[in-house]
Image: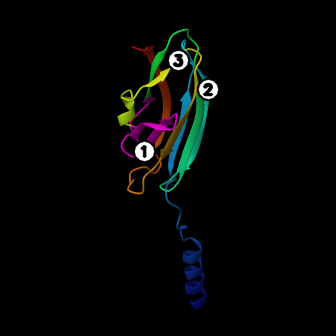
């Protein structure tokens, strides 16, 4: 009987489930494409991060070039399938050393109010920084596949 109790206890200890780990952080991918009026370098997929957590940021730098013969006003907006991280993912866009946008992914679904004016042939570096603020809570195992869209119109 003592041997039976010992074997039962050994089996119960051996069958314990491991503690596991928390769900992964957020998955964020960012793409951008050229337009008929603007060249973008690099283009296509710029970022693909699979475990973004608060305290970690990703930054993308690209060059936007006006390939037309006229001055253009350029605004940026985000397109994303789903709204998993709309209120969690923070975005900051700078160009020519000036802030063009600061807010959430959801707010960037509307084109930026601050326009970037490009003269014909002008090349401007643009920086896009994405992160989860320390207050972010509902981000684990969520994703955002973001496509940055550059919208241009003739400058006034």
Q: Position of residue 48 (x, y in %)?
A: 59, 39
Q: Secondary structure at mark 1?
A: strand
Q: Secondary structure at mark 2?
A: loop
Question: Looking at this view, is 156 or 128 the one in front?
Answer: 156
Please state the extent of the stretch shown in magenta in the rendering: 78-105
Q: Residue furthest right?
A: 42
Above/below status of 77 relative to 52: above
Mark closer to the chain start, 1 or 3 = 1
* Residue drawn at 51 percent across, 10 percent down: 70
Q: Is residue 116 magenta?
A: no
- Spatial CA distance of label 2 from label 3 is 21 Å
**Residue at 45% across / 41% down in the picture?**
92
Residue tagged by mark 1? Answer: 90
Given residues 8 and 70, the one toward you in this image is: 70
Q: Residue 2, position in %: x, y?
A: 57, 91
Q: Badge 3: few (under 14), some or many (20 or more) residues near its Cα, within 10 Å?
A: some
Secondary structure category for the residue under label 3: loop
The quarter of the rendered structure image containing the N terminus is: bottom right
Q: Residue at x 35, y 35 (%)?
A: 107
Circle 3 residue: 119
The total of numbered circles placed on residues is 3
Residue 104 visible? The answer is: no
Residue 144: x and y in percent read 47, 38
Q: Which residue is mark 2?
A: 43
Badge 1 or badge 2: first in the primary sequence: 2
Distance from the alpha carbon under mark 1 to that under mark 2: 22 Å
User: Upstream in the sequence, badge 2 or badge 3?
Assistant: 2
Quick check: 55 left or right of 41? left
């Amino acid at each position: 009987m003592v041997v039976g109790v010992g074997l039962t206890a050994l089996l119960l200890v051996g069958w314990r489930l491991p503690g596991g780990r928390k769900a992964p952080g957020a998955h964020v991918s960012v793409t951008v494409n050229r337009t008929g009026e603007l060249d973008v370098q690099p283009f296509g997929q710029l970022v693909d991060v699979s475990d973004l957590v608060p305290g970690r940021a990703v930054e993308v730098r690209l060059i936007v070039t006006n390939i037309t013969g006229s001055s253009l006003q350029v605004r940026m907006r985000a397109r994303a399938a789903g709204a998993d991280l709309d209120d969690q993912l923070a975005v900051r866009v700078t160009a020519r050393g000036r802030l063009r946008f600061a807010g959430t992914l959801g707010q960037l679904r509307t084109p930026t109010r601050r326009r970037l004016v490009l003269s014909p042939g002008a090349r401007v570096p643009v920086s896009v920084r994405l992160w989860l603020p320390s207050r972010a809570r509902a981000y684990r195992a969520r994703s955002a596949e973001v496509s940055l869209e550059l919208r241009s119109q003739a400058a006034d």
